[in-house]
Every structure is written in C-alpha cells, then in structure tokens.
Image (spheres, rainbow, N blue to C red):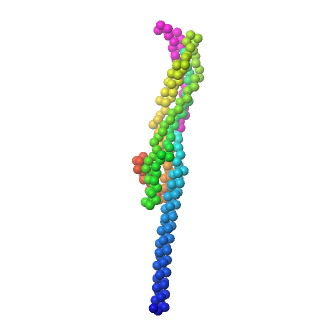
Amino acid sequence: MDKKSIIFLLSGAIIVLLILFGINKCSSISQEKSTSYNYLLTNQITKMNKMVVVEQDFSSIQKTKLSFEILGKKISDNEIVTLTNTNAQVSYDLKKMKLEVDSINKKLIIKELPNAEIKINPNVEIQSMDDSFINRIDENQIKKVTKSAKDAAVKRVDQNQLRSEGRNQLKENLNQIFILAKALKYEIVDETGQIDTTKL
C-alpha cells in the first residue's frame, strides 16, 4: 500500500470519528436541554404547591324584638341588637393538582385541578339587650337570636361570585407555569376541560 493510500484511509477514519463524535455531542446537548427544561417546569410546579385563598369580609347589624304576652295580650317588647362579622373564603389546595411534564413530546399536561373549598365563618356579638323587669331575656332566646343572625349572614354570601373570584385567582397562579412552558416551547394540554388553552 503506497503512502497516498495510507494518508487517504487515515483521513477518512478521522473524518468518520469526528462525525460520530459530533452526533454524540449534539445528542448529549439535546438530552441535557430536555432534562434542564423538565427540571425548570417541575421546580416551578413544586413552588406552586400551596393554598390559593380568596376572602370576603362583611358586617351586618340585626335587631330582634321579643314580645312577652299574658293571656294573648302583649305586656312588653324586648329587643336584642347583634353585630355579625363574617369571613367567607374560597380556597384551592394546589397539592391536589396533578400536572405532568412530558419532556419527550414537549407537553405540559393538566391532569387534575383541585375543587373549590368554601368556608363561611360568622361571628355574632350582642351589642345591646333591652329587656324589662317583668320579662327577662333568657339564654335560650339569646341562642335563637344568635343562630338566626348566623343563618342570615351565611345566606348573604354570594357563593357563585366567591367561586368565580377563586377560579380567576387560581388561573392567575397557573399562568406563572403556562408562561414558562410557552417560553420553553412546550404545548399545554388540558385534560380537565376547565381551561381554554387557545387563550394561553
């Protein structure tokens, strides 16, 4: 074998090795990128695993008259004035949310969203009691008036509005993940049917 043939064979072998090395390096870089994107999204999802809460606070005053009668004739009117401070909240436990990161097909899949949990806490305070010497207000009457004030406060809460506000807050929190997913060129797939992905 002459010198030219040897140089030609060696050159060919070196070129093949360089091509193989280049392909391997590109594949390795691509794999590292995919792992890095997966970590970024998963890390952001983990950071979001907290409670989303929307609250409403309101107060109301209620006057209740209690009549005292003897033989069908009203002798006196007693009055109880109550102040009710109500805290109503809707919350979403994001630990119950299920998101899947498919790094191979570059998809962020929304598997499950948490349900809204509504809590209404009315606190009733007696502001004044106007009773007579003949007809004293007893403990049972106070309990009835307090229960009535609490029931009225619960009815005043617009639960549909509360759910709507909570859902909007939940979407705002999820947008942090969606923006990152879009930046990394991941497709967002909603399997729950609760989010309009065309608007993301």
Q: Residue at x 47, y 86 (%)?
A: 8
Q: Position of residue 149 (x, y in %)?
A: 51, 25
Q: Residue at x 58, y 23 (%)?
A: 126
Residue 165 visible in this rendered orientation of the protein:
no
Q: Nearer the viewer, residue 116 or 155?
A: 116
Q: Hey, which residue is sitting farthest top in the picture?
A: 71
Predominant SS of the magenta segment: strand
Residue 76 among magenta residues? yes
Q: Residue at x 52, y 57 (%)?
A: 39
Residue 150 visible in this rendered orientation of the protein:
yes
Q: Position of residue 30 (x, y in %)?
A: 49, 66
Q: Position of residue 81 (x, y in %)?
A: 56, 21
Q: Position of residue 164 (x, y in %)?
A: 47, 40
Q: Residue at x 49, y 42 (%)?
A: 92
Question: How many numbered marks does the figure carry?
Answer: 0
Q: Nearer the viewer, residue 70 or 20?
A: 20
Q: Nearer the viewer, residue 194 or 50?
A: 50
The boundaries of the magenta stretch are 55-77
Q: Quadrant of the N terminus?
A: bottom left
Residue 176 among magenta residues? no
